[in-house]
């Protein structure tokens, strides 16, 4: 029959879980020992539980399967929180095991006592404590299905002494493994078709919810002659093979997306929970989303459609007419190309001799050299900007980041989870020096498990995004810069091959060496701390802030291959 800890691990194996990320210790010991004695599942030792939660989030997002992390009682639990917030806000199916103090001591102020059910309430959809054998395996199965059903994170609290109790019978419930398809009601489809036909100028704005609906979105854009913009999370699913692309909106945006959205008679939000209200027109807006709780929470809607994007478009396409006037689409594509032409020189001018190295140049070369199915993990901050503007999607590449939670230090632990999910796939961490410094101990995790993660450090000795925020507010930057750190030397001390690059002429060869390496490799690139990026639309007050604070050059940010794509779209956009 075995113990509850053994039963817990057996149920995880039945659900397809292959690893548990965490740091071993005290109240977790029965569970760790159960992992040791169970075939097909391993304990992945990380240096910080936060990194374990990030790694689980990345594994879940790249595989679509349940991933698991664990923390011991007290501090081990609380270390999980930041990574679990990231996983939950990203919708990643992650189960966290939060072990607890001895059950008889709960409520007495015992050593390391916390209240896990309160602590994890905001970063999970399900959080319960297992206090006796009769609750297993039902609670665990329910937690698994909550996560797989679209709920993000589930947390189970398990006191160490309860984990050692004799278990009851183990059920073999068949878990569906994912949510079904949401079909919108007939009256909403009819109303959507009516609005699409009535509007002269339609603009489509795509988020991560267009995954799997690329063909349908392209067909709709061709039918209504609409430009297509996207959010950062939507980029990887919609920008490739897209002759209607007008770029990205938001704080990291570029191109004509903002202009198209504000000049359209009808804006259709496709599977996006875009949070920045200031970038949305606030009028003439329709939203399609499989999650009804998101409808209308960012902007007023003329119509809310509750359904999966692909299913909804398949239902509405036969009902709408082919538009014949491409004037709005043509104007936005020309504007998009014009805007990109205007700013692309920011990174191409004098690039061969510019020292410190333009970070845009590093990202552009990396985009050229990386594999067609590479997974890029991206630190929050300026690395988000370079990834948004220089990494070219193709339908097979993935780009993971803390795009909803906005945490520093996510890139390296995300890379660990993505690489463990598939050791043969190229995984590249775009790490800022600030983010890497925060969870630098995970270099030891990479070495310990011999993971072929390629870590590219954008080393500008600055918290670049924070500097930008201060400048926008009219404040002089303060405490954003620090002394240079040789991260290549640190990696080498950890046993990881590494190199440091300070000249642009060395970038391509160094990246080639790093990507061709069979095992882990860290490339430390000394980049320009003054290479900043401003949004495609800023207010007069923000401009005044720049004028007050900027004693240095603020670059508008080049956009690499985006310009070539825009030129091609002008020539090749399909005509009715």
Image (cartoon, helix red, strand yellow):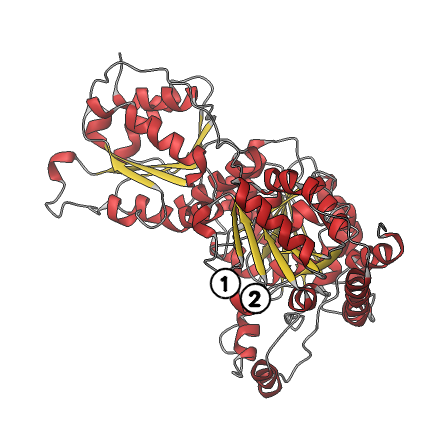
Query: Is the residue marked by circle 2 packed among few (<14), some (14-19), or many (20+) residues within 10 Å?
Result: some
Residue 528: image location, x then y, percent: 68, 69
Are dots 1 and 2 in contact, CB under 8 Å?
yes
Residue 134 appears left or right of 401: left
Residue 547 lies, in percent from the top left, at 62, 86
For mark 1, does the 10 Å Cα neighbourhood hold few (<14), some (14 to 19), or many (20 or more) residues?
some
Residue under the point 69% across and 79% down = 553
**Residue 379 percent across, percent down from the top left:** 56, 55
> Quadrant location of residue 241?
top right
Disc 1 is placed on an element classified as loop
Residue 166 shows in the view? yes
Q: Give the percent coordinates (x, y) of residue 566.
A: 81, 58
Looking at the rendered image, the quarter that the N terminus falls into is top left
Residue at 69% from the left image edge and 53% from the top image edge: 197
Q: Secondary structure at mark 2?
A: loop
The residue sitting at the right extreme is: 571
Q: From what the image shows, is residue 485 above or below residue 132?
A: below
Residue 300: give its label.
1
According to the picture, the residue beneath numbered tag 2 turns out to be 283
From the viewer's perspective, is 197 left or right of 30? right
Viewer-closest of 349 and 394: 394
Residue 256 placement, left or right of 295: right
Which residue is at the far top?
1
Q: Residue at x 78, y 60 (%)?
A: 329
């Amino acid at each position: 029959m075995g113990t509850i800890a053994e039963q817990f691990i057996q149920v995880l194996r039945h659900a397809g879980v292959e690893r548990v990320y965490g740091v071993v210790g005290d109240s977790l010991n029965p569970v760790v020992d159960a992992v040791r004695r169970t075939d097909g599942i391993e304990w992945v030792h990380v240096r910080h539980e936060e990194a374990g939660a990030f790694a689980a989030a990345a594994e879940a997002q790249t595989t679509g399967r349940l991933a698991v992390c664990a923390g011991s009682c007290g501090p081990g639990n609380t270390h999980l929180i930041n990574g679990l917030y990231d996983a939950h806000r990203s919708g990643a199916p992650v189960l966290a095991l939060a072990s607890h103090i001895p059950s008889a001591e709960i409520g007495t102020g015992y050593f390391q006592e916390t209240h896990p059910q309160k602590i994890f309430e905001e970063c999970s959809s399900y959080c319960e404590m297992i206090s006796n054998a009769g609750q297993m395996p039902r609670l665990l199965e329910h937690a698994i299905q909550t996560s797989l059903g679209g709920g993000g994170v589930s947390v189970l609290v398990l006191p160490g002494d309860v984990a050692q109790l004799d278990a009851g019978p183990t059920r073999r419930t068949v878990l569906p493994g994912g949510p079904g398809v949401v079909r919108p009601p007939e009256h909403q489809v009819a109303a959507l078709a009516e609005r699409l036909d009535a509007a002269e100028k339609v603009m489509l704005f795509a988020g991560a919810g267009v995954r799997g609906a690329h063909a349908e979105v392209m067909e709709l854009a061709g039918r209504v002659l609409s430009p297509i913009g996207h959010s950062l999370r939507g980029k990887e699913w919609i920008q490739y093979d897209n002759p209607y692309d007008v770029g990205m909106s938001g704080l990291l945006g570029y191109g004509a997306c903002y202009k198209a959205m504000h000049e359209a008679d009808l804006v259709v939000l496709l599977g996006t929970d875009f949070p920045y209200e200031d970038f949305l027109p606030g009028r003439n807006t329709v939203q399609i989303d499989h999650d009804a709780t998101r409808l209308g929470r960012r902007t007023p809607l003329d119509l809310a459609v509750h359904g999966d994007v692909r299913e909804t478009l398949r239902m509405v396409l036969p009902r709408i007419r082919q538009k014949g006037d491409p004037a709005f689409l043509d104007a936005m594509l020309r504007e998009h190309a014009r805007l990109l032409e205007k700013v692309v020189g920011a990174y191409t001018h004098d690039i061969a001799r510019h020292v410190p190295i333009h970070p845009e140049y590093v990202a552009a070369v990396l985009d050229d050299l990386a594999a067609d199915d590479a997974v890029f993990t991206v630190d929050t901050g300026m690395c988000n900007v370079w990834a948004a503007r220089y990494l070219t999607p193709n339908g097979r590449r993935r780009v993971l980041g803390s795009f909803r939670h906005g945490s520093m230090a996510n890139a390296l632990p995300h890379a660990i989870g993505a690489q463990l999910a598939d050791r043969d796939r190229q995984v590249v961490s775009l790490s800022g020096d600030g983010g890497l410094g925060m969870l630098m101990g995970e270099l030891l995790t990479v070495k310990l498990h011999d993971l072929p993660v390629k870590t590219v450090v954008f080393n500008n000795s600055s918290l670049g995004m924070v500097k930008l925020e201060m400048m926008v507010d009219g404040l002089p930057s303060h405490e954003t810069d620090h002394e240079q750190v040789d991260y290549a030397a640190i990696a080498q001390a950890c046993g990881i091959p590494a190199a440091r690059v300070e000249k642009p002429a060395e970038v391509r060869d160094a990246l080639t060496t790093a990507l061709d390496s069979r095992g882990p490799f860290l490339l430390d690139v000394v980049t320009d701390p003054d290479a900043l990026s401003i949004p495609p639309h800023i207010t007069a007050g923000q401009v005044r802030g720049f004028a007050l604070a900027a004693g240095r050059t603020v670059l508008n940010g080049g956009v690499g291959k985006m310009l070539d794509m825009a030129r091609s779209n002008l020539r090749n956009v399909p005509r009715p």
